[in-house]
Image: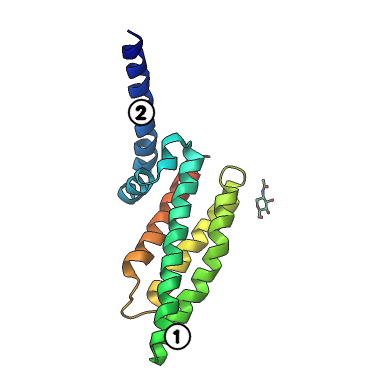
Amino acid sequence: MLLLFLLVLFTQNYFSHGDLIADTCEKTEYPRICISTLRSNPDSKTADVKELARIILKAALGKVNTILNQANDLLKKTKDRLVRQSLNVCISVYDEALDEIPDAIANVGTNNSEANIQASATIVDADTCEESFSNTPFKADNNAVKQLAVVALDIIASLG
Ligand SMILES: *[C@@H]1O[C@H](CO)[C@@H](O)[C@H](O)[C@H]1NC(C)=O
């Protein structure tokens, strides 16, 4: 009897939490990356909506670091002037994102308009990096940064 009770409690809890991720993500422009990002982070299990937004932003920060590392590596290897110029554009805008994204994370829930401004700036950074190349080596990661920032904005907007 007790076991059944615990089981019911557990499943209710489990599913109600599964629903928070699905419900939150389905209201965003990119539900797929939203759901896969949140489900791959164990912190999501106990997170409220604000924390879900922060987890999405941390994932965007991870992608930004990936791009910065690759851009710095490529910069060491290439002599092509135009490619170097483009790499430096990406490095410069994503260096700013290293401040913007933590600032957005810090402001979620306490100053949503400020969080919105910083996450919006990150979208512009991804576009700027992408457009600085005619043939970008960062397409997938730029896309991920952009989509995660859009998802974060959508979640932040839902906080009211
Ligand atoms: C939110 O942050 C902005 C920029 O830092 C600031 O001007 C504004 O006063 C803050 N709003 C609140 C409610 O703290």
Position of residue 85 measured from the top left corner of the image (x, y, whole percent): 45, 85
Res. 117 in view? no
Residue 103, picture quadrant: bottom right
Q: Which residue is mark 2?
A: 14
Q: Residue at the location (32% across, 18% down)?
A: 7
Task: Look at the picture and state if 132 lies above or below 5.
Answer: below
Assess disc 1: are there few (<14), some (14-19) or many (≥20) residues with their C-alpha within 10 Å of its C-alpha.
some
Q: Residue at the location (50% across, 59% down)?
A: 120
Say how many tags the image has: 2
Task: Look at the picture and state if 153 lies above or below 127.
Answer: above
Tell whether circle 2 marks a residue whose Cβ is less than 8 angstroms from ligand 1: no
Q: Find the residue positioned furthest to the top.
A: 1
Q: Residue at the location (37% across, 18% down)?
A: 9
Give the amino acid type for the residue marked by disc 1 in the picture.
Answer: Gln
Assess disc 2: are there few (<14), some (14-19) or many (≥20) residues with their C-alpha within 10 Å of its C-alpha.
few
Mark 2 vs mark 1, CA separation in Å: 50 Å
Foreground mark, 2 or 1, reads: 2
Q: Secondary structure at mark 1?
A: helix
> Which residue is nearer to you in this view: 46 or 56?
46
Res. 145 in view? yes
Give the colour scheme shown.
rainbow
Q: Earlier in the sequence, mark 2 or mark 1?
A: 2
Task: Look at the picture and state if 106 lies above or below 48.
Answer: below
Residue 38, picture quadrant: top left
The N terminus sits in image quarter = top left
Give the amino acid type for the residue marked by disc 2 in the picture.
Answer: Tyr
Position of residue 123 measured from the top left corner of the image (x, y, whole percent): 45, 62
Position of residue 138 measured from the top left corner of the image (x, y, whole percent): 35, 71
Q: Residue at the location (49% across, 69% down)?
A: 94
Q: Which residue is mark 1?
A: 85
